[in-house]
Image (spheres, rainbow, N blue to C red):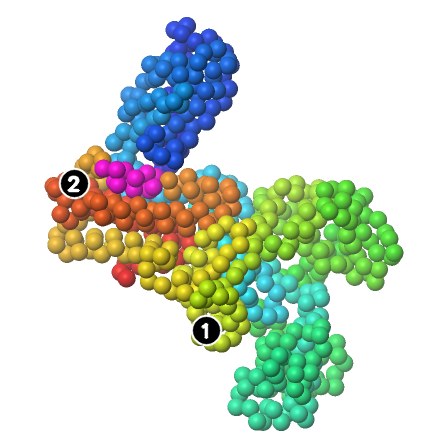
Amino acid sequence: MNHIASASDQVRSLILEALGRLVADSLIPAEPLPDFTVEIPADHAHGDFAANIAMVCARPLRMPPRKIAELIQSALILDDSPFDKVEIAGPGFMNFYLGQRWYGDVVRSVIAEKEMYGKTDSGAGKRVLVEFVSANPTGPMHVGNARGGAIGDCLASVLQAAGYQAEREFYINDAGNQIEKFGKSLSLRYQQICSEAGQAVCKAAADTEQVCKMIYGEDGKSGEFPMPEDVYLGQDIIAHAKNFYDLHGDEFLNAPDEERRKALVAFALPKNIQGLEDDLAQYRIRYDTWFPESRLHADGSVQKIIQQLKDSGYTYESDGALWFKAQELGADKDFVIVRSNGIPTYVVPDIAYHYNKLVTRGFDRAIDILGADHHGYVPRLKAALTALGVDASRLTVVLMQMVAVMRDGKPVKQSKRSGKALTLVTLLEDIPVDAARFFFNLREANSHFEFDLDLAVEKSSSNPVYYVQYAHARICSLIKNLADGGVTVPPADRAALQLLDTTAERVLIRQLAMLPAEIDAAANQLDPSRLTKYSVDLAACFHKFYDACKVRDAESEQLRDARLMLCEATRQVLGNVLTMLKVTAPEKM
């Protein structure tokens, strides 16, 4: 039940019914009326809902706004509505105040709906594919991937809560230039290990990790084992080459270069992909689909897309290459889709991939979480989809800004505990998963974000995730302690919820009522940070209520039971939001 939306709709209905009575009584002319807004005032002293109907009707009704507001007020019938009074403010704003019954109904709804409370059906019947992280499988995930993972995973949860059939997907870039570079890197390291100097290192080292450190050198390319500029220099490359050598010896040393690279990639790439899957699972992310780029090459999709773009009339040849007329379809410039050597450019598989999402698999909408450096790529991709006859508005790209990881007020480049370059894995060695997921969703994706490692592990109200979790644990402890004394949460139909009439109680209940609207807003805006902010605000409302209103020692048993039920409703809603964010809801801290 969305009590906020329902009350807002009833404001509109009450006003329209009152206007109808005024027309019937010839008190206002029967003129077409403009639309008007119903909103929630920032200051609840000005009402729970406010309408500007009198202001927008001044011209068509040829009356002062205040006079119109007074007429509407006189014709309002509030019986059986959630409102107990309406006041006129300023030149004619109409302020509606909720009655006590509404507050009790909100608490009862939370108790009745339990873990389903807050969920809506606004996206019912619509299939959405959320693609996020999709990190290069040739190396470890960086901190930017950690932010993208938290945002993408929580966005998918938000969409599901709003009724969408949302799926999560990881696009594996297992073809193209980066795989060629991966193969070349592995091949060079394998040859180094097979060499006399390499064998000496292997014999002197205690294990593979020490081999990596000895071969890697100070900067990854110094010492006896130099590497060219156009390769990957990570120690993971050395480890793969060493493990491959342990399995095959120098069997591939004198093999043709292409054969050696292919064997090394076939050995190392699945391990990297499994590593990505394992690391993301540790981060509580599990995908519905891992989609390999190589599938698009193997099943002919890439070549089919090239032909379809040719058939669309939006291609031309220049200097032996095939170009796409992207400018004619709103992009900043035309671009090459097939090089003069006949090899498609990297963007063609991407076009084929998104065509597969929206046409082949028939998702109503595709959402990509990408780094801000892709801002020029998006209009080109949309232009290609348009040329293919696909409504490009069905693709939405959320551009994510960079993350600055801070410790002691200074930027951090490596993990304090492991001493390694800061990646998703090393980040989770320094801070809890709860903190990582919550913190990366504290800001909108398009905002720059400073991740404070010190704050993330601090056990104080300054740490937002701790603050929210503490509110949940505090309620659990209260309920348990009362239950130990024989006082349990009463059935909803026996609680005197009309007694919850203090400001602190009403503010808390209004915040509980906002959850369905916040979920819909987060889904519409593709902004899961609304839910972290909501949970922090809810925790603040609860702490203020708990400080202002006695529960155990309330003035009467009836009031105690009503407040206990309010506590239970708050615990339920905090738990629902934390579950959506995949952050634990502790019962004690």
Name the residue beneath numbered marker 1: 416
Q: Residue at x 44, y 57 (%)?
A: 439
Mark linked to residue 559:
2
Query: Which three-letter amino acid code belongs to the residue tagged 2?
Result: Leu
Mark number for residue 78? none
Judged from this view, the residue extending furthest toward the top is: 26
Q: How far apart are labels 1 and 2 at the CA level?
A: 51 Å
Lower sequence index among marks 1 and 2: 1
Residue located farthest toward the front when viewing the structure as drawn: 409
- From the viewer's perspective, is residue 185 above or below residue 309? below
Which residue appears at 75% of the width and 53% of the height? 304
Residue beneath the point at 72% across and 55% down = 348
What's under tag 1, amino acid-wise? Lys
Q: Which of 234 and 456 is in front in this view?
A: 456
Q: What stretch is highlighted in magenta?
A: 502-513
x, y percent for residue 241:
63, 81
The C terminus lies in quadrant:
bottom left
Magenta-drawn stretch contains 510: yes
* Callout 2 crowding tier (Cα within 10 Å): few <14, some 14–19, many ≥20: many
* Side of 34 where 82 appears, left or right: left
